[in-house]
Image: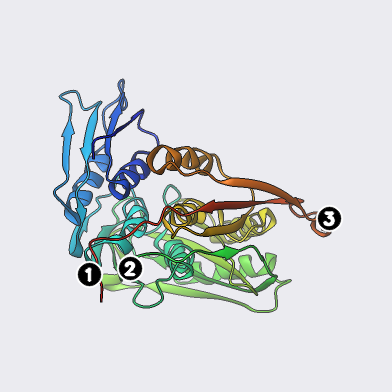
Amino acid sequence: MSKIVKFEGHNYFRQRLVLATLAGKILKIDKIRPNDANPDFEANFLRLLEKVTNGATIDISYTGTSIVYKPGVIIGGKVYHDCGTARAIGYFLEPLVALAPFAKSPMNITLNGITNDNVDLSVDTIRTVLLPQLKKFGLEEGIELEITSRGAPPNGGGRVTFRCPIVRSLKPIQFTDEGRIKRVRGVAYCTRVAPQFSNRMVDAARGVLDYVNDINIAAVHYQGDKSGLSPGFAVSLLAKTTTSVYYSAELAGGAGQAPEDIGLQAARMLLSEIRKGGCVDSIAQTLTLLYMVLGPNDVSKVRVGELTPFTIQYLRDLQDFFGSQFKITQEVDNDKTVLGAAPSSLIMTCVGIGYINTNKKTT
């Protein structure tokens, strides 16, 4: 653990902490918001990281603009954490999904806070898009995200429980066939508003997506203890192809917004995501590429659509922490160009570093 990886700025804060934890390298970040007050949610995430690891040390400068993180062992286990209301549960849960398979014992983490907003990933999208990615790399059984109650901003009050088994090593993937859209699923929920809000979102979304025969969007009205502390409504949509590719879109409504507008816009966002193509949804690009790097000393290959700016920086960070590089080739699909869809996609290829979860006992 002698090498120190250095960065500047507050961007990509969580992701770099996760990569440092997995790589076992000391992380130093300087110039973290030098002219602004440091938000509570970043300190809150550090507290969560301390709960799921053992032996980690975090040194924060007097001004709060510099941090040195020495990672410990990922222990997992049963953890309870209050995420507060500055950021949604997704801000805290997304990094845990990346760490969970490499813990000493299976994770069983309960998180309280906001379940759906338009800043962080919703718990619905994490459950329907991110978690299925784990199964492609060899985690078949025991992955679960239970949504006990909803929590809309500003006061939250939602609760979820994330359970994940552990593995000693991942499997390589060959995932280049996008397939064709087979069905659309989703959930439209509302809390502390009229139950009709959910149905109105569903009707608006279905009107845009009616070219797909198999559509099932559940309309759910949460009441009592399951409705959180604030009124709110949101919709999360998922399209699945014949080769188990998932495309997603989500949108939360606020005061003064019509449910129909939320359903309509979410459906259009889903069509836009489908148009980008690839075998991995935009929000799942980084997790997939990370697991390809951590895979065995074998070739993994995946087709992606347009790389997000976040993913591009993530590729640089993967090289800084693991020394890994991807071969990127562009493929043009003339059929799609004729249909007005994305004319090209990228084939991402890499050789895994053979990462072993030494915390897991061999059987």
Q: Which residue is mark 1?
A: 361
Work out whether mark 1 precedes mark 2 in sequence or the reverse, and give the earlier one. 2
Disc 3 residue crowd, few under 14, some 14–19, many 20+, Cα 10 Å: few
Horizontal and vertical percent position of residue 31: 31, 23
Q: Which quarter of the figure has residue 192?
A: bottom left
Query: Looking at the image, how many numbered discs can be counted on the residues?
Result: 3
Q: Which residue is mark 3?
A: 334
Disc 2 secondary structure class: loop
Residue 69, which numbered label?
none
Outermost residue to the top: 35
Give whichever of 275, 178 is nearer the camera: 178
What's the amino acid at mark 2?
A: Val
* Quarter placement of the C terminus: bottom left
What's the amino acid at mark 1?
A: Lys
Q: How far apart are labels 3 and 2 at the CA level?
A: 41 Å
Q: Which residue is mark 2?
A: 167
What's the amino acid at mark 3?
A: Asn
Work out whether mark 1 precedes mark 3 in sequence or the reverse, and give the earlier one. 3
Residue 216 against residue 131 in the figure, above or below: below
